[in-house]
């Protein structure tokens, strides 16, 4: 697919917004994909953001960036788009956990649009419902972030971040939303010293050419490694 001149919107948390010191027009996979494709791109992502609405910062009580409701702002500011690419779930998992009622449930036969967006599952369903209805001709996709965290926690399906991502994949399948699973489909892994050095600080890992800054957030090299996968996936939508 020729991406030249297409309008693409990204939204998510710090993994999509990028925590580096680079200027906004060069950060993360949004810049790499958008600039490579010569697209008109916009990144609404905010560090600490959640898919789930009504989530607040623990220290200040301030509202977090709620991806499920930001779609209304996106539509108001960009009534026509060609691509909508979402990411998120890490902060939801960290704040809510596997046993929380706010993980939510879903019904495979329910496409009514009446979802509780204060649960993770309901928020993702609400997001997809609105995105499809706001932009019936657009290509919509969801990115599952790469592996992140400390090796001692492990990366099995009961690891709470992966647990939330697996729920997100279930909701993508229900709604027919294409997804790319970088957690399983990307080679980078913070438990491998080729990609992350736990004995080094952020600057040390950046200087050493690691893929991760801190075992979670990516370096420029990390973004370079996964952005080619994301670009090819978006081109195939």
Image (spheres, rainbow, N blue to C red):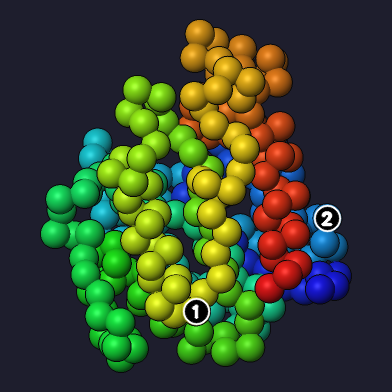
Residue marked by disc 2:
36
Mark 1 touches mark 2? (CB < 8 Å): no
Query: Quadrant where the N terminus lies?
Result: bottom right
**Residue 152 image-quadrant placement:** top left
Q: Mark 1 to mark 2: distance in Å?
A: 27 Å
Q: SS class of the residue under badge 1?
A: loop
Q: Residue at x 46, y 35 (%)?
A: 148
**Image vertical order of residue 57 relative to residue 202, above or below:** below
Q: Position of residue 52 (x, y in %)?
A: 31, 61
Q: Residue at x 21, y 65 (%)?
A: 104
Neighbours of disc 1 within 10 Å: few (<14), some (14-19), many (20+):
few
Q: Position of residue 202 (x, y in %)?
A: 55, 18
Q: Residue at x 62, y 67 (%)?
A: 9
Residue marked by disc 1:
176
**Residue 120 image-quadrant placement:** bottom left
Q: Which mark is residue 42?
A: none
């Amino acid at each position: 697919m020729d991406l030249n001149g297409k309008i693409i919107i990204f939204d998510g948390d710090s993994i999509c917004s990028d925590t580096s010191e680079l200027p906004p027009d060069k950060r993360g996979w949004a810049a790499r994909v958008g600039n490579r494709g010569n697209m008109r791109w916009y990144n609404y992502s905010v560090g600490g953001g959640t898919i789930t609405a009504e989530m607040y910062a623990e220290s200040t009580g301030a509202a977090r960036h709620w991806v499920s409701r930001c779609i209304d702002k996106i539509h108001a500011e960009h009534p026509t788009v060609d691509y909508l690419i979402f990411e998120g779930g890490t902060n939801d998992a960290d704040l809510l956990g596997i046993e929380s009622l706010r993980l939510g449930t879903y019904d495979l036969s329910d496409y009514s649009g009446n979802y509780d967006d204060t649960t993770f599952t309901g928020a993702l369903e609400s997001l997809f419902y609105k995105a499809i209805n706001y932009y019936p001709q657009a290509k919509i996709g969801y990115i599952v972030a790469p592996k992140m965290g400390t090796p001692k926690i492990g990366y099995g399906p009961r690891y709470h971040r992966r647990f939330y991502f697996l729920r997100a994949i279930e909701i993508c399948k229900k709604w027919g939303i294409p997804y790319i699973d970088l957690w399983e489909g990307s080679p980078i892994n913070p438990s491998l010293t080729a990609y992350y050095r736990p004995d080094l600080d952020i600057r040390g890992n950046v200087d050493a050419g690691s893929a991760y800054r801190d075992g979670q957030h990516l370096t420029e090299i990390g973004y370079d490694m996964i952005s080619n996968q994301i670009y090819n996936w978006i081109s195939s939508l």
